[in-house]
Image (cartoon, rainbow, N blue to C red):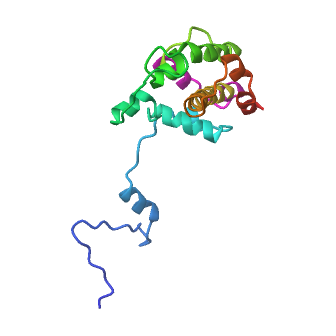
Amino acid sequence: MSSTARLAANDVPLLNGRSLFVLAEMWKDICPSRSRVEWHKLIWFFGHVPRASFICWLALLDRLTTTDMLKKWGHLVTDGCCCFCQMEEENRSHLSFTCSFTKSIWEKIRNILFLAGPTGDWDKEYNEALEWKGKKLETIIKKLAWTVYIYIVWSERNVRIFQGRAKSAEVLTCSEDFVQFFY
């Protein structure tokens, strides 16, 4: 048997100039580089809360199992109304920032953080949050507040739907669930 390997037409040599195998080159060949998403540092930052960042990641990808998404995925949904206000169909934007219940919580948080202007929809809040750059404590607190807020809203939504219990907006913002993330 010959000690020299023969390359097929689609084989690519992965040796550097000194005839050494380079794993990084193989990795690049197998998994082409992906561009980094613009929101990466909004949820994955020093001091992030993993469970809050995970839920926020799903929200950013629009993969939370809201009733509008369940319908898109072909599931039968009898009542698609928001569990907080019972007024509009539950979707990411409504649930997070335009529902009267959750909006009151976010406005309270915005006031604490000295964020100017009225609360908007998902796109407005997301675009504003993308501007929070750097590693200053103020920036970390804003990012933490944003991700934890999304997490708390999603958690409360699930408690209401699956356990039949509900907390008021005041109780939620003063609850141990919310405050624990900041201490």
Which range of residues does the magenta coloring cover? Answer: 123-140
Which quarter of the rendered picture does the N terminus lie within?
A: bottom left
The residue furthest bottom is: 1
> Does residue 93 show up magenta in the picture?
no
Decide which of 158, 94 is in the foreground and name it. 158
- Quarter of the figure with residue 167: top right
- Quarter of the figure with residue 46: top right
Q: Is residue 18 visible?
A: yes
- Does residue 124 sit above or below 11 in this rendering? above
SS majority, magenta: helix
On the image, the x and y values in percent for residue 42 come to 56, 32
Decide which of 134, 53 is in the foreground and name it. 53
Q: Residue at x 62, y 29 (%)?
A: 152
> Does residue 137 show up magenta in the picture?
yes
On the image, the x and y values in percent for residue 100 come to 55, 12
Q: Is residue 38 visible?
A: no
On the image, the x and y values in percent for residue 63 come to 44, 35
Q: Residue at x 71, y 15 (%)?
A: 112
- Does residue 19 sit above or below 110 in this rendering? below
Decide which of 86, 142 is in the foreground and name it. 86
The residue furthest left is: 9
Which quarter of the rendered picture does the C terminus lie within?
A: top right
Q: Residue at x 62, y 26 (%)?
A: 149
32 with respect to 167 (left or right): left
Q: Residue at x 65, y 30 (%)?
A: 144
